[in-house]
Image: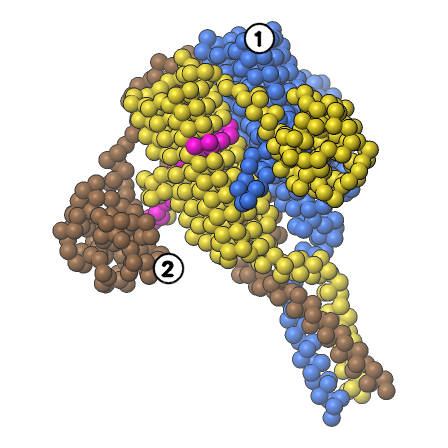
Chain colours: A brown, B blue, C yellow
Amino acid sequence: MNKTLAEIAELVGGTVIGDGATRIVGVNGIKQANEGELTFVSNLRYLPYLETTRASAAIVGSAVTSAAIPLIQVARPDVAFWTVLKSVADAEVFRPHAGVHPTAVIGAQVQMGKDVSIDAHVRIADGCVIGDGTVIYAGVYVGHGSSIGGNTILYPNVVIREHVTIGARCIVHGGAVIGGDGFGFVPLEKVLYKIPQVGTIEIGDDVEIGSNTTIDRATFGKTVIGRGTKIDNLVQIGHNVEIGEHCVISGTTGISGSAIIGNHVTVGGQVGIGGHIDIGDGAVIAARTGVSKSVRPGAMVSGFPMKDHKRDLRIMACISRLPEIAERVHELEAQIRELNERSDR
Amino acid sequence: MNKTLAEIAELVGGTVIGDGATRIVGVNGIKQANEGELTFVSNLRYLPYLETTRASAAIVGSAVTSAAIPLIQVARPDVAFWTVLKSVADAEVFRPHAGVHPTAVIGAQVQMGKDVSIDAHVRIADGCVIGDGTVIYAGVYVGHGSSIGGNTILYPNVVIREHVTIGARCIVHGGAVIGGDGFGFVPLEKVLYKIPQVGTIEIGDDVEIGSNTTIDRATFGKTVIGRGTKIDNLVQIGHNVEIGEHCVISGTTGISGSAIIGNHVTVGGQVGIGGHIDIGDGAVIAARTGVSKSVRPGAMVSGFPMKDHKRDLRIMACISRLPEIAERVHELEAQIRELNERSDR
Amino acid sequence: MNKTLAEIAELVGGTVIGDGATRIVGVNGIKQANEGELTFVSNLRYLPYLETTRASAAIVGSAVTSAAIPLIQVARPDVAFWTVLKSVADAEVFRPHAGVHPTAVIGAQVQMGKDVSIDAHVRIADGCVIGDGTVIYAGVYVGHGSSIGGNTILYPNVVIREHVTIGARCIVHGGAVIGGDGFGFVPLEKVLYKIPQVGTIEIGDDVEIGSNTTIDRATFGKTVIGRGTKIDNLVQIGHNVEIGEHCVISGTTGISGSAIIGNHVTVGGQVGIGGHIDIGDGAVIAARTGVSKSVRPGAMVSGFPMKDHKRDLRIMACISRLPEIAERVHELEAQIRELNERSDR
């Protein structure tokens, strides 16, 4: 990267405050940036760092009108910075291997798209469909009859089991396992017999799935991840779960079988969602919530057992004062005893 | 699948209510089923769906005697449906590759059983024993001196480290790592020195291990998973843990080193079990419990710190009313003040 | 192993109590040990087992002066036993394959150190640096421009993404994914756009990383793991996290983006650490803590929301008595009612 601040301002549709000829050779966080780099302030708690940053310029919101360094003023600094990052990243697109590497083992009747990159030691089983421009890194397994959309990236050692459908422009990070058997058993005289998991998985376009995340296939029917949904690392998604569009599921969260999650739902980290639960559109599940019953659209919930978030905050405040509350109860008992004695006299 | 309802009733030992000639071409959940499919009702909360399902027939328990669609009545609908699913799945057994794929790299002195299926890019180190009929998918690693029983399935990219023993008819899902070093260090002047993990792992017959689950080898001696135990995805099992027979361990649970778990124990999701803890036969550990001390056989526990489950439910109910309890304490204080003033007068 | 007790006492700098000619052929835990094996007692709760162990000898601390079996007395039994284990393990060093296996696929301009062991189906992309004596097991992927220090071990199916730096004498266990994209998106009219993750990761010397653990690369700048830090299995570490030196991070813990952790910090299992949080040197975070705000150096914290550990213990004790506290409040109300009635009369 090597641009003037004025050129970047044009790219993001912003206004330069200060020297537009300032030369920018990289981008960085406000605490880490060095001379020649552009940074940004979106979260106002980072505003004080604008005075001490070594960056040569910053993208800021309309509330900031001057600083020790040149600025680009925009309505949404996060979006503007994303635009700059994206222009840098797009200029550096990487493909592990053009075409199909000779060590890849491709099954029979595989429909291979145009301009694919399939790296060493990939195994694609019979009857798969691989979309145009899709990139499959080393060590990936794609089971028979599975279909991967165009311009999707499967990072190294991803496992896609059989008869799974993945959309276009998806990103699946290293080690994720998609389509493992659902966890279902029938107990018969204290022995557990496996319920065959004959269903599958359907993942929409523009979905991102984190490293070592696991998504189980349906017992029958299908597990569904809606278009545009983003799933972090080490998330467990059980059989027959249905997640809507444009949701965010944070890391180390577990979602039990047959839970139904709407669109635009935000799920924090280390959340547990019980089986057969419904979560409405736009709901927000705070980190570490244990979702033990269904959640209304737009609600914000937290705690375990789960409560409305505002109610949970009140309860948490009470818990923090619990030793003092217990002390006051003890004190009241003493006073009552005394009053009783007095009134008996 | 293409059978009459009468044929299926015979398979499961049930009684047809309605037209036994109804033709069944598939099986599905009650909400997802379409015409031509068979469904079932085991959990009574799904009973209302029997009126609206598009399925052509249903397996039900003795409590249901009529419906808009033909029925098969049995004592245990879950077992009967499992029997049907199993007959469908058994007809469709899949093997990734007959024999040993030429890209697999097999070490010296490996005892290879009959009728194995070893797919592309598998690596089996020296001195391993692979049982008859065992299926090893692409990208699996088996370390030196390990032994895999007959008719076991290792799904893609599973890692079995050295000197590990796995029983017959086991299923290990994609990406699971069995035999990694236990997590043990000796602190010497604030630096941590690794304790060599010279022990191993012994896994019984009919064990199922979920995707990306990790089971550590023993420091010395062995980590043990008993016959018939089923472990879900993303479970962490520490060094020298001993789990009994026919247990169920749900997803994203962590079990610390040297915990001892009996037979027929049920562990919910996101449970944490501390080190050096004993859990008795038949105990039930509710989801998200933090097991901080030993559990008696047959007990049901929950919460963190862990409590008897009934006691925990009472405590949880109190916590939910805590703001009101605090308010009542405040109110009592006001009334006492007033009584004191009155009595002082 | 085949040594006399006297030889072992010399190795660990201890004093023999009893027959120094006792022959030792192995080491084991006090409950599992058999005849011919050496065991140890470090934790005093295991002292009673010294009477019943089948071991032929034990390493003990200065508090133990006699037993039914010969002893080696030392100041730190854990360190002495570690010394013995290490001498056993060092005699059995294993290398999966000397040199570079012919099925490994090595990119252009890779600087390969001396005495490396690179096993089957490894993929090393262009421009990597592999240090002397480093061992890379089967199925490992190392992305372009990454650097692995000397005498480091990468266990099977590890994924190291591009431009990552790993130090010397590190151990990365099977299936770990290092350098996946950070989890960051810009929301624009309810659709989430990926923030390119153009940063990297820097891992110091002597770091150990557990099976299937995931460490994300920085959005920009770098994610840092300091020298000597040990990370257990299934741990999630977000983008731009900085962890100091000689820390211990236990299994299934999640650390959100941009958290800063000092040196010598101990983090228990199933801990969640929020984003942009500071944890001071030497802090201890108990298992299952939800770290929602910064932690002072040397503090011990627990609970969720997080509290000083001593305070949390008091609160936990109150919670355990909550049904009785609620009952007492109820009782107080009855007594007040009666007093009010009496005083009204």
Name which residue lies at 29% across and 49% down.
A33
Q: Position of residue A228 (x, y in %)?
A: 39, 39
- Nearest the eye: B23 or B88: B88
Q: Looking at the figure, which quarter contains the N terminus of chain B?
A: top right
Query: From what the image shows, is residue A8 above or below residue B50?
Result: below
- Judge left or right: residue A332 versus residue A179: right
Query: From what the image shows, is residue C319 above or below residue C41?
Result: below
Return the chain for callout 1: B
- Judge left or right: residue A180 versus residue C12: left
Start and end of the magenta stretch? C168-189
Question: Is residue C244 in the magenta section?
Answer: no
Is circle 2 on the same chain as circle 1?
no
The residue under label 1 is which amino acid type? Gln
Q: Quadrant of residue C125?
A: top left
Query: From what the image shows, is residue A275 above or below residue C93?
Result: below
**Residue A45: which disc?**
2
